[in-house]
Image: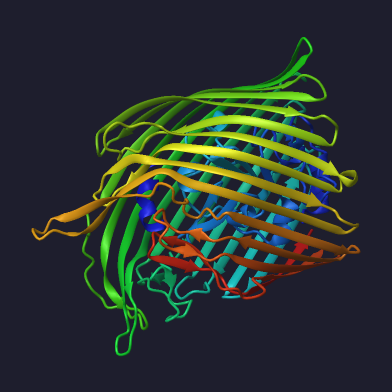
């Protein structure tokens, strides 16, 4: 959490062989993608695991869960997590400095209010989450602490990776696109004759020059996995993944008078050559499962995560416009970060199906123990001013502007939890979830020690008056430990949500729709001040309505649509900022009340559409659109990004074992801006881009 607060200064088609094998996996296998049956609607998954840790039909899930399955990921050419999340209602997708995934869910940012998981295990705080090996992406919107502990105040995202299956197949793919972008992927699966032992390997290489000056990047990833099923009741799954990425952070373009200046080209960069972002990520996971009977099962998940991050990124702090005879000026600082994160944990769980009277129960009880280490150093350095119109770097000393921030912390968590899915009859189901987290925190550098213990409950009811209709309501509550930088009494940050929803299937199942209305509140938000102190002087509330639909309007047609209206308000928000120097030379600070303002990057309207038409067995044409409404880029609401709409298209042609693809992004070459930094700069969105690709299945 220290790292989140500090870094915010700078950032603020499945092969047929595989599908057949998946359906043949024994039902006692560890819960993975093989347990899910494809819906008749291509882009409409019928189940998820994120709300209960067990496969549950979406119509009986008392929460608005978003699921983006492999067919849609493949059709859109999704590369990183943000590409998938655009299909989920209520999520505004951005990036952090162009070097890590960042999104806003129901008006709350992912750094302070979200949790990313891979195969049900938590991830390090910030990175680009690659989808080269993803089978599915699931999103649980709202407080998720009842299953996942501290920090998911507004939502949790689970990336479900491809698992070994009892089959022999492989896939090689390559693509080339605009701005010097090239990518190669491999997906190779082998299994023993009896299917007891299976091995799968996924690999990725990608490089790009970037469309903006000096924005080149490279990613290399390997993911070997192995599954052993000695009998029908037991499975053991090993998974290890190594990923290395090298990007250059994007400082963006300066705002002058609250708008992007038209005096400079949109691909111009004001970052020095020393800017960099190098990440090495390692994931290790072992899943064991044994079914003692048809009623109860024991399973264990041992996981490890390691992220090494060396970064230096430029922050534009101000600009002077150009005028005749004067090229203008850009004022800059550089944020240098050296961060090592280590996370080890274990989840031991028992599932039981039983009946008490007329009520059937599906129980999951578990305990999670984890140890997280976070060792970091963050420096804020001065950079020489640079010309607005003709930025040329001049070598010069980098002077620290403040004492370095550093930490060497260890957080130990021990948390029992349980879920009870109670079925009363064909019309009523009740879900109750509860988790209690005991957290021991110690920072060796500051000598800070803290013990926290909090309860995270969730209750949901589903009523199905008829077979194609389901109505649900839920209440949930989550917490996050207070930042160690908070001055005075430290209280846990808390969130509470009430949600009411409706799911409906129409036209013989050719249309599936879900509608949700919610109110979520977050209290005791920690706000960093310019004087170096942090105070819990913030509360935020969001109210909204979300609609998601998947349809097959006619044979060969597939469509998915998502819309969200979000009203996100800072109900209590005060920050103390530097305003100048006194005559004596001492700095002057002033407190500004932002109460009543809209939250940053929380547009009122978000919409996404993807439409595909398959002609025969070979040709598929797709067209997609996305609309993002106006959004403020900081809590002061001083600068607002205009709303924009994007149009994308794709063509896929299957010929024997080959698939050829063409993807066209931002067809209209629309100019738009994405996440800014405070009220000083924004990052221009990517213009028109084309990508051609080929896949070979064997």
Rendering quarter of residue 172:
bottom right
In the picture, measured across the screen, residue 335 lies left or right of residue 613, that is left
Q: Nearer the viewer, residue 674 or 33?
A: 674
Say which quadrant the C terminus sits in: bottom right
Q: Nearer the viewer, residue 596 or 621?
A: 596
Q: Residue furthest front?
A: 596
Q: Residue furthest bottom?
A: 325
Above or below, 478 against 155 in this view is: above
The x, y position of residue 600, in whole percent, is 46, 54
The x, y position of residue 427, in whole percent, is 80, 25
Colour scheme of the picture: rainbow
Rendering quarter of residue 471:
top right
The x, y position of residue 495, in whole percent, is 49, 35
Q: Residue at x 79, y 56 (%)?
A: 559
Say which quadrant the N terminus sits in: top left
Q: Nearer the viewer, residue 432 or 280?
A: 432
Above or below, 93 against 325 in this view is: above
Q: Residue at x 74, y 59 (%)?
A: 610
Q: Is residue 119 visible?
A: no
Rendering quarter of residue 148:
top right
Q: Nearer the viewer, residue 320 or 418?
A: 320
Q: Residue at x 32, y 80 (%)?
A: 328
The x, y position of residue 272, in whole percent, is 35, 72
Above or below, 303 against 242 in this view is: above
Q: What is the count of numbered marks? A: 0
Q: Is residue 445 visible?
A: yes
In the picture, measured across the screen, residue 566 lies left or right of residue 597, that is right
In the picture, measured across the screen, residue 100 lies left or right of residue 472, that is left
Q: Residue furthest top?
A: 357
């Amino acid at each position: 959490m220290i790292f989140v607060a500090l870094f915010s200064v700078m950032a603020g088609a499945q092969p047929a062989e595989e599908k057949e094998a998946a359906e043949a996996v024994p039902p006692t296998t560890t819960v993975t993608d093989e347990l899910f049956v494809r819906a008749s609607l291509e882009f409409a998954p019928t189940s998820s695991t994120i709300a209960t840790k067990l496969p549950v039909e979406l119509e009986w899930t008392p929460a608005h869960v978003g699921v983006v399955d492999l067919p849609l990921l493949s059709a859109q050419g999704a590369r990183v997590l943000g590409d998938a999340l655009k299909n989920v209602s209520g999520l505004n997708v951005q990036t952090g400095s162009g070097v890590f995934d960042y999104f806003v869910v129901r008006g709350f940012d992912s750094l302070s209010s979200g949790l990313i998981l891979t195969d049900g295990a938590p991830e390090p705080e910030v990175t680009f989450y690659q989808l080269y090996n993803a089978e599915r992406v699931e999103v649980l919107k709202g407080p998720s602490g009842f299953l996942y502990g501290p920090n998911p105040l507004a939502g949790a995202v689970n990336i479900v990776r491809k698992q070994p299956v009892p089959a022999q197949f492989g896939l090689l793919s390559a693509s080339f696109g605009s701005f010097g972008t090239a990518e190669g992927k491999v997906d190779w699966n082998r299994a023993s004759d009896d299917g007891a032992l299976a091995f799968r390997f996924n690999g990725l290489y990608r490089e790009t020059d970037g469309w903006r000056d000096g924005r080149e990047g490279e990613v290399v990833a390997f993911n070997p996995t192995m599954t052993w099923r000695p009998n029908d009741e037991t499975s053991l799954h090993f998974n290890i993944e190594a990923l290395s990425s090298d990007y250059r952070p994007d400082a963006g373009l300066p705002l002058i008078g609250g708008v992007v200046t038209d005096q400079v080209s949109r691909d111009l960069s004001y970052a020095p050559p020393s800017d960099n972002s190098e990440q090495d990520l390692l994931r290790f996971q072992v899943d064991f499962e044994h079914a003692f009977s048809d009623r109860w099962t024991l399973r264990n998940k041992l996981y490890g995560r390691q992220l090494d991050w060396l970064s230096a990124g430029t922050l534009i702090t101000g600009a002077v416009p150009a005028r005749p005879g004067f090229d203008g000026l850009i004022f800059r600082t550089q944020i240098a970060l050296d961060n090592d994160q280590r996370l080890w944990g274990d989840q031991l769980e028992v599932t039981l199906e039983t009946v008490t009277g007329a009520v059937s129960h599906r129980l999951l009880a578990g305990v999670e123990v984890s140890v997280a280490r976070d060792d970091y150093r963050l420096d804020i350095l001065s950079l020489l001013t640079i010309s607005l119109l003709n930025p040329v770097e001049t070598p010069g000393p980098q002077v620290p502007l403040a004492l370095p921030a550093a930490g060497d912390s260890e957080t130990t968590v021990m948390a029992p939890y349980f879920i009870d899915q109670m079925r009363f009859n064909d019309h009523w189901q009740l879900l109750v979830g509860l988790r209690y987290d005991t957290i021991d925190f110690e920072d060796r550098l500051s000598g800070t020690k803290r013990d926290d213990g909090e309860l995270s409950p969730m209750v949901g009811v589903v009523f199905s008056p008829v077979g194609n209709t389901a109505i649900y309501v839920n209440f949930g509550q989550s917490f996050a430990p207070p930042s160690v930088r908070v001055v005075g009494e430290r209280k846990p940050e808390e969130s509470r949500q009430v949600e009411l929803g409706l799911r409906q299937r129409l036209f013989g199942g050719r249309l599936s729709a879900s509608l949700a209305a919610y109110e979520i509140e977050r209290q005791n938000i920690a706000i960093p001040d310019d004087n170096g102190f942090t105070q819990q002087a913030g509360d935020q509330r969001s109210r909204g309505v979300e609609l998601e639909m998947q349809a097959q309007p006619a044979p060969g047609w597939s469509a998915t649509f998502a819309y969200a209206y979000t009203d996100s308000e800072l109900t209590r928000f005060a920050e103390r900022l530097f305003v100048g120097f006194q005559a004596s030379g001492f700095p002057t600070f002033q407190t500004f009340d932002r109460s009543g303002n809209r939250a940053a990057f929380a547009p009122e309207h978000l919409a996404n559409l993807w439409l595909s038409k398959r002609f025969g067995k070979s040709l598929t044409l797709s067209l997609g659109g996305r609309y993002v409404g106006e959004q403020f880029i900081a809590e002061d609401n001083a600068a607002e990004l205009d709303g924009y709409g994007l149009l994308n298209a794709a063509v896929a042609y299957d010929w024997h074992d080959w698939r050829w693809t063409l993807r066209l992004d931002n067809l209209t070459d629309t100019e738009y801006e994405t996440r800014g930094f405070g009220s000083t700069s924004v990052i221009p969105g990517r213009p028109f881009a084309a990508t051609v690709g080929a896949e070979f299945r064997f």
